[in-house]
Amino acid sequence: MINLSYVLWVMLPGLLLSGWASMKTKAAFNKYSKVRTMNGYTGAQAAQRLLHRAGITDVKVEATRGFLSDHYNPMTKTLALSESVYASPSIAAVGVACHEAGHAIQHARSYKPLWLRSALVPTAGIGSKLGIYAMMFGLFFSQWLVLAGAVLFSAVVLFQLVTLPVEFDASRRAKVLAVEYGIVQPQERIGIDKVLNAAAMTYVAAAISSILTLLYFLMRSGLLGGRRG
């Protein structure tokens, strides 16, 4: 059901872009995971200090398994840091930990894009599972099925687009507050910048891949561009 044009115009660019972003993130993290911060804060200590200085006392910082599986859960107010971040006093670990703490600050400050992203999670989950299949089958049976699938899959695109300002803002907060709160020295900021900027590109890659997928099916079905082919 997946033809050559889909591979060439959607899957291949998406895979290349995602692979490039992932490689940049891993390379930056691995490089700066070997550089110890001058003040010696571990990832967990950095996150706790940032939260404390921001006046947030109801968020729990805990360790979790997996490489770069770090995340903040607004439902439980839990900031989970991966094993390579939680106990590490490296610039990379501190950068990632402060980024996740940035999400906790967003939550505490009622940052609207974060609220919108959380609200979109259920519909995006449905869209990612059903939307793509509806569009695939619709190419063979009905434009209406493609349209229905496109509507469902649009929730995925919207979720990923909303994710961009959420992630960029969390990184911005991390970069500024890590220095302002004395977690790292000003000259160490460049390392944090490189780690977080590389990580941000993975979200850009995901958004572009989803947009390419949606446009492909709309054009193939004739719903966009006026020609079915």
Image: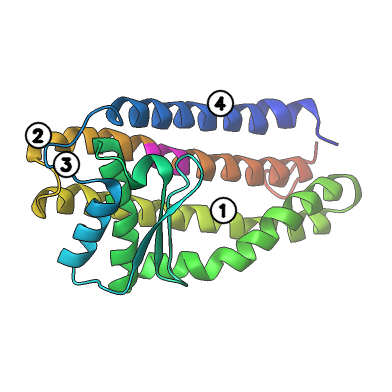
Magenta: predominant secondary structure element?
helix
The CA distance from mark 2 to mark 1 is: 37 Å
Q: Answer with mark 4 or mark 3, whichever residue precedes in sequence.
A: 4
In this rendering, the label closer to the viewer, 3 or 2: 3
The CA distance from mark 1 to mark 4 is: 19 Å
Q: Which mark is residue 40?
A: 3
In this rendering, the label closer to the viewer, 2 or 1: 2
Q: Mark 1 and 4 residues: CB-CB less than 8 Å, in contact?
A: no
The CA distance from mark 3 to mark 1 is: 40 Å
The CA distance from mark 4 to mark 3 is: 37 Å
Q: Secondary structure at mark 4?
A: helix
Q: Report which quarter residue 136 is drawn in.
A: top right
Identify whether 86 is placed above or below 78: above
Q: Mark 2 and 1 residues: CB-CB less than 8 Å, in contact?
A: no
| Residue at numbered disc 4 | 16
**Mark 1 belongs to which amino acid?**
Val
**Mark 2 belongs to which amino acid?**
Gln
Of 55 and 24, the residue lying toward us:
55
Q: Magenta stretch?
A: 199-203
Q: Residues within 10 Å of mark 3 (few under 14, many from 20)?
A: some
Task: Decide if residue 207 is on the left or right side of residue 224.
Answer: left
Residue at (14% x, 48% y) in the render = 183
**Mark 3 belongs to which amino acid?**
Gly
Q: Residues within 10 Å of mark 1 (few under 14, many from 20)?
A: many
Residue that sits furthest to the right in the current view: 141
The CA distance from mark 2 to mark 4 is: 33 Å
